[in-house]
Amino acid sequence: MVELDINREPPSREFLEKHIGADDFLDYVSTRSPVWKERALPKSKKEAIDLMMQNPNLIRRPILIKGSKVVFGFDKEKYAKL
């Protein structure tokens, strides 16, 4: 297992574009972040990713990667399926 500090090494835009859904993009952001609470909700996947690129703390953590499967945020059920 590899641990990365997303503040020092945030995921690339390409990674986020590939793994974040166009219709469920709000599921990939940490809405509990104080930074998030100060902003209006993004209206598109592009706007959400732009905000995540500016502030990696908005990305839901942890990000678990196993092969081609990716899970954003702690989710025991999704982890068990991997």
Image (cartoon, rainbow, N blue to C red):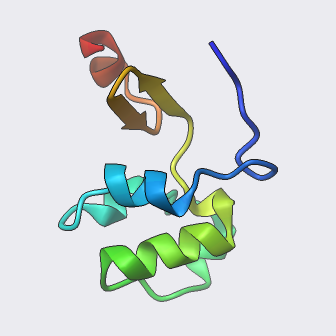
Q: From the top left corner, tell me how far across and down residue 18 is, in percent.
A: 34, 53
Name the residue furthest front: 14
> On the rendered structure, is 29 left or right of 22?
right
> On the rendered structure, is 20 left or right of 49?
left
Name the residue furthest left: 23
Above/below status of 8 relative to 72: below
> On the rendered structure, is 8 left or right of 25?
right
Position of the N terminus, as image quadrant, is top right
Residue at horizontal 31%, vertical 64%?
25
Q: From the top left corner, tell me how far across and down residue 80 is, in percent.
A: 30, 11
Q: From the top left corner, tell me how far across and down residue 78 is, in percent.
A: 29, 23
Above/below status of 8 relative to 76: below
User: Which of 43 and 11 lies nearest the eye of the viewer?
Assistant: 11
Position of the C terminus, as image quadrant, is top left
Quarter of image, res 71: top left
Residue at horizontal 31%, vertical 85%?
43
> On the rendered structure, is 15 left or right of 3?
left
Above/below status of 47 relative to 67: below
Quarter of image, res 36: bottom right
Residue at horizontal 46%, vertical 51%?
15
Quarter of image, res 21: bottom left
Above/below status of 36 relative to 9: below
Residue at horizontal 45%, vertical 27%?
65
Task: Give the number of marks.
Answer: 0
Q: From the top left corner, tell me how far across and down residue 58 is, in percent.
A: 59, 62
